[in-house]
Amino acid sequence: MRMEDLTWPEFDRIKGKVKAVILPVGSVEAHGRHLPLGTDVFAPLELARRVEEKVKEKGSEVLVLPPVWYGHSFVLNTYPGTINVRPESLRMYVGDILSELAAEGFERIVLLNGHGGNIYPLIEAAEDVAELYPDLEVFLINWWMDFREEILSVCSSQGHAGEDETSVVLAIREDLVKMAEARGRRVKKKVRIIRKDIGRELFPDGVNDDPSGATAEKGEAILETVSIRIAEIILGGE
């Protein structure tokens, strides 16, 4: 069920009945010339929807929260349309959300993250709140990283706006994908370089992979496999 669809009495009644709450977190940023700026939110939102279905099939419920759209995106901020939020701002904002959920009595919260730049602020936000609520468990799930093995059984490669991410968006919103513009290459550096506009080198045209092999069928396979795994984690508490 979606939190924003509930009245407050309905929300109050279901609080003690859900297995977990899921907070999708993403970013608004450049994803090549072929993918929409909302890619990093579209993916976790769709995964959350599928996880909800799979958990319900097992006789349990999860509550899906409205997503956090904006994230920390220093590297891609060199491209138009990227909205970069400072890490401390994201940490505080998500931390406040987690605190409110914990105060409502929820003890299992899933941060379903779709963007790499969010990882450290989300860890810190969860640690801050966990210090205050000893019974709270926060699961940070970075879908493209934590299930890399499963994804690479479907795609030949992974990368920002690459084959895996492009396939997922094709499966979710094919109408928003410009496959005629889907091109890119893998760029690697031996050490992390932090410099203004470094994204032009690391992500030429906002891509760091070859997306040309992406298909909606591959995306569907990724979404299905990953959502099954997340549902298992929620139900099993692993």
Image: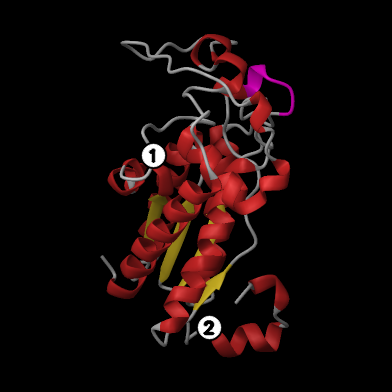
Tell whether position 78 is magenta: yes
Residue in the foreground of this view, choosing between 174 and 23: 174
Residue at screen point 54% across, 31% down: 161
Residue 92 visible in image: no
Left or right side of 188 for 80? right
The label number, if any, that marks residue 15 in the structure image? 2
Total label count? 2
Left or right side of 82 for 226? left
- Quick one: SS at disc 1? loop
Residue 73 visible in image: yes
In terms of image quadrants, where is residue 71? top right
Residue at screen point 33% across, 12% down: 191
Measured in 3D between alpha carbons, the distance from the residue under mark 2 to the one under mark 1, in whole angstroms, is: 39 Å
Q: Main secondary structure of the magenta part?
A: loop
The label number, if any, that marks residue 44 in the structure image? none
* Region of the chain picked out in magenta, as a range: 77-81
Amino acid type, label 1 = Cys
Amino acid type, label 2 = Lys
**In the image, residue 63 above or below residue 176:** below
Residue in the foreground of this view, choosing between 74 and 235: 235
Q: Position of residue 72 (x, y in %)?
A: 57, 33
Residue at screen point 31% across, 49% down: 150
Residue placed under numbered mark 1 in the picture: 155
- Is tag 2's residue or tag 1's residue first in the polypeptide sequence? 2
Left or right side of 27 for 21? left
- Quick one: SS at disc 2? loop
Quadrant of the snapshot with the C terminus: bottom left
Q: Position of residue 169 (x, y in %)?
A: 59, 45
